[in-house]
Amino acid sequence: MDPLFREVQRFRQPWIWTLLGGIALLMLVLGPISWGGLVIVGAVAGFVYSLRLTTEVRADGIYLKMWPLHHSFRRIPWAEIEQRETKQYRPLREFGGWGIRWAPGKLAYNVRGNRGVWIERTNERDVLLGSQHPEEFVKAIDEAVQ
């Protein structure tokens, strides 16, 4: 069965690539060339480029996967969800940045931007799922739980 909602997000912000490219350029210009350092910058760039957050709304819950860190989907079943709402948030101030972020009593999966879906759970940490389409995401949740 096809999901009611599916979103795939990747780290493609220009500032990330400018920062990594600037570091590599500085290593080449300032130094004796540190091939080990360039390899590390290249590996970090390759890893960041490969990261992707996939979120789906299915009949039995919300599924999320941050590949390549998660090899299978994580599921949040409907029974665990008390409330959900679209939310505008401050990634740096509230969670310390983007990616998979932990804070006391809450967890965030975000890739870009400052909008998402806030999910309050019954017995687990609350979760923020970053989204470029939070209204469609919540609408799909509402359809699935009816």
Image (cartoon, grey):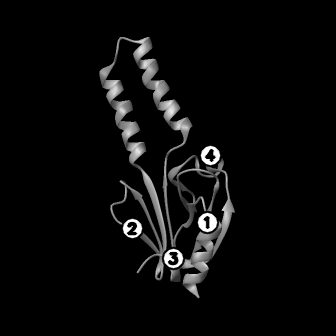
Label 1, label 3: how many angstroms apart (C-alpha)? 15 Å
Question: Which residue is painted at 58% across and 60% down in the image?
Answer: 131
4 and 2 marks in contact (CB < 8 Å): no
1 and 3 marks in contact (CB < 8 Å): no
- Give the quadrant of residue 87: bottom right
Question: Which residue is painted at 47% across and 31% down in the image?
Answer: 20
Disc on res. 4: 3
Position of the N terminus, as image quadrant, is bottom left
**Amino acid at circle 1:** Val
Disc on res. 92: 4
Label 2, label 3: how many angstroms apart (C-alpha)? 16 Å
Question: Which residue is painted at 43% across and 77% down in the image?
Answer: 2
Counting residues from the start of the chain, the first of labels 4 and 3 encountered is 3
Counting residues from the start of the chain, the first of labels 2 and 3 encountered is 3
Label 4, label 2: how many angstroms apart (C-alpha)? 26 Å
**Amino acid at circle 3:** Leu
Secondary structure at badge 4 equals helix
Q: Is residue 18 depicted above or below 115 in this figure?
A: above
Instruction: Name the mark nearer the viewer: 4 or 2.
Output: 2
Looking at the image, the residue that sits furthest to the bottom is 146
Looking at the image, the residue that sits furthest to the front is 2
